[in-house]
Amino acid sequence: MEDSQLFSQQIWQACEQQYASNPTAYIELQDHYQVNVNLFLLAQELDKSPQRLTVEQWQLLQESIIHWEQTVLVPYRQLRRLAKAHLDTDEYQKMLDVELMMERKSQRIILQQLNSMKVNCFSDTDSDSNNSNNSNNSNNSNNYLSLYGIDSSYFKP
């Protein structure tokens, strides 16, 4: 059924709450490792659910936004950071608002790609019987961060 989507825009509200818990740490991951914060927040949110994406699926999600982010979002972010010292607070806030609008476009692209995927679900009994696989090695955060050679234990929000 095309009109039934597993994931809705509401998932980003939970991700935004998670981001608010430690924005500095997320920005550090972004700046030092080029981790896509939206994808990492999504991975953390999906870790709370039975849905599990493979490393390959995380790679596909990454690829779905790479052109948009490399050609528009990242250059704009760099411009905003360069301009910060030369803008008053109101002007800088307007630049932040535009960047947030661009981040939301990234989220829509990710969500569209995510809803086109077949996502595996695991029950509590699956994770109990195979605890080392699901909770440590095969969770979404670890699968996503493995694209960067980072273990998810590096980042504990």
Image (spheres, grey):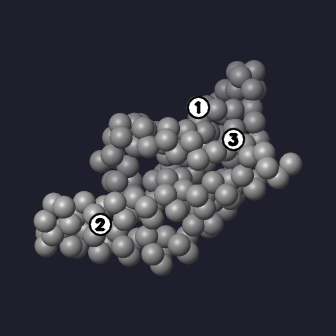
Q: Residues within 10 Å of mark 1 (few under 14, many from 20)?
A: few
Circle on res. 52: 3
Assess whether mark 1 and mark 2 are in contact (beta carbons under 8 angstroms). no
Pointer 1 residue: 48
Helix, strand or loop for disc 3: strand
Q: Amino acid at mark 3?
A: Arg
Circle on res. 86: none
Q: How many angstroms separate mark 3 from mark 2 (CA)?
A: 35 Å
Left or right, residue 19 beside residue 11: left
| Mark 3 or mark 2: whose residue is earlier in sequence | 3
Left or right, residue 149 beside residue 77: right
| Mark 2 or mark 1: whose residue is earlier in sequence | 1
Q: Residue furthest bottom?
A: 71
Helix, strand or loop for disc 2: helix
Q: Nearer the viewer, residue 24 or 94?
A: 94
The image position of residue 70, as x and y in percent, is 48, 74
Pointer 2 residue: 95
- Determine which quarter of the picture holds residue 86: bottom left
Q: Amino acid at mark 1?
A: Lys
Question: Which numbered mark, 3 or 2, is in the foreground of this view?
Answer: 2
Q: How many angstroms separate mark 1 from mark 3 (CA)?
A: 10 Å
Residue 79's place in the image compared with 148, above or below, is: below
Residue 128's place in the image compared with 1, above or below, is: above
Q: Residues within 10 Å of mark 2 (few under 14, many from 20)?
A: many
Q: Amino acid at mark 2?
A: Met
